[in-house]
Image (spheres, grey):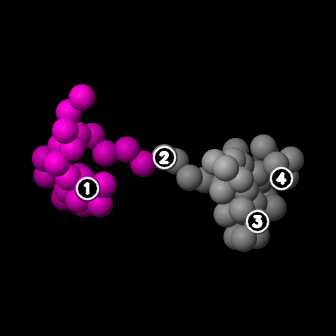
């Protein structure tokens, strides 16, 4: 396993600046489409109500 020499923030900032990183940065796709459907909602409910959408995202990772 490669030893990490950068923090997650340093890694993402370097990648955005197109500079070398210690490994490829990865960020999960955080949208409301799957979480809303998983909770039995319409996508519209998740998109129109920010608190409900965020709650759905948190719930699928809990």
Q: Closest to the observer: 3 or 61?
A: 3
> From the viewer's perspective, is the residue at label 4 or at label 2 nearer?
2
x, y percent for residue 36: 76, 51
Where residue 53 sits: x, y (%)? Answer: 71, 62
Q: Quadrant of residue 46?
A: bottom right
The Cα–Cα distance between marks 1 and 3, rounded to whole angstroms, is: 31 Å
Question: Label 1: which residue?
Answer: 7
Mark number displayed over residue 42: 4
Location of residue 51 with respect to 19 vertically, above or below: below
25 relative to 54, above or below:
above
Task: Give the label on residue 28, or none.
Answer: 2
- Compute the Cα span from label 4 to label 2: 22 Å
**Can you tell which of label 1 and label 4 is closer to the viewer?**
1
C-alpha gap between disc 3 and disc 2: 19 Å
Q: Say if mark 4 contacts mark 2, CB within 8 Å.
A: no
Q: Earlier in the sequence, mark 1 or mark 3?
A: 1
Give the residue displayed 31% in from the left and 45% down from the top. Answer: 25
Q: Earlier in the sequence, mark 1 or mark 4?
A: 1
């Amino acid at each position: 396993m490669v030893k990490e020499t950068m923090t997650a923030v340093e890694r993402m900032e370097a990648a955005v600046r197109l500079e070398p990183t210690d490994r490829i940065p990865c960020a999960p796709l955080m949208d409301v489409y799957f979480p809303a459907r998983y909770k039995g909602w319409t996508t519209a409910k998740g998109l129109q109500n920010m608190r409900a959408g965020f709650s759905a995202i948190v719930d699928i990772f809990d």
